[in-house]
Amino acid sequence: MKKISIITSLILLAILIGCKTKELTPEQQAKAKEYAEKIENRNFTFHATSAQPMSGRTVNLNYDYYLKVKNDTIIANLPYYGRSYVAPINPRDISIDFTSTNFNYSDTKKKDGSYEIKIEPLDITNRENVGISILLRISPSGYGTLNALPTNRQNISFYGTID
């Protein structure tokens, strides 16, 4: 009986040690602070490295696809893979490609240091991208997930880094 209680205690101790929150090194803290400043100043670029359409496999991207946020302008150059509910007039208009100076922007800092940014461009004239919403989640380490939520097409997610 005594052996069982000792073994149980050791297992519980190992579990508790494994659940300890990871503390950032000074270098990681400096990087996290740098990313936070860029986000709060609205001066950053999300570089997409892969895309995940709703109906398909992950596509690795080897071209510079991005979403740039500059204080009063948002520039998107992202590919689109998925189902469209409205046929494009010009087949070249399939991508998520726009520049917006009139948009709603909100950012929220989470307890774990990550950010959640919501962007709704209001001045898009390209009918494939009208009504699109963008949800960007950025971790303290600079990795991000961008969810594009178009009204006339299936949603698509992008994974990448912040610069």
Image (cartoon, rainbow, N blue to C red):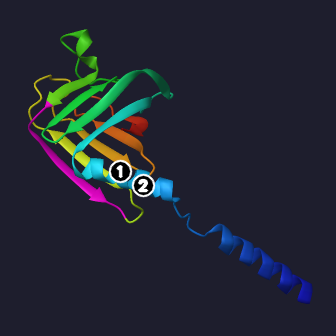
Q: Where residue 149 sits: x, y (%)?
A: 28, 38
Q: Nearer the viewer, residue 154 or 16?
A: 16
Q: Nearer the viewer, residue 64 or 158?
A: 64
Q: Classify residue 51 by image quadrant.
A: top left
The residue stretch that appears in magenta: 100-110
115 part of magenta stretch: no
Q: CA distance from mark 1 to mark 2?
A: 6 Å
* Rendered view: 151 above or below 145: above
Q: Is residue 40 left or right of residue 47?
A: left
Look at the image and tell me in which quarter the N terminus lies. Answer: bottom right
Q: At x 20% / y 10%, what residue is drawn?
A: 90
Q: Where residue 53 sits: x, y (%)?
A: 41, 30
Q: At x 35% / y 25%, what residue is drawn?
A: 65
Amino acid type, mark 2? Ala
Q: At x 14% / y 22%, what residue is drawn?
A: 126
* Rendered view: 135 above or below 109: above
- Which residue in the rendered view is the most extreme toward the bottom? 2
Q: Which mark is residue 119?
A: none
Which residue lies under the disc numbered 2?
30
Q: At x 28% / y 21%, what residue is drawn?
A: 95
Q: Is residue 94 left or right of residue 12?
A: left
**Residue 152 seen in the figure:** no
Q: Where residue 120 sits: x, y (%)?
A: 18, 41
Q: Is the residue marked by circle 1 packed among few (<14), some (14-19), or many (20+) residues within 10 Å? A: some
Amino acid type, mark 1? Glu
Q: Classify residue 48 by image quadrant.
A: top left
Which residue lies under the disc numbered 1?
34
Look at the image and tell me in which quarter the C terminus lies. Answer: top left
Cβ atoms at labels 1 and 2 below 8 Å apart = yes
Helix, strand or loop at label 2? It is helix
State whether the magenta stretch is mostly helix, strand or loop: strand
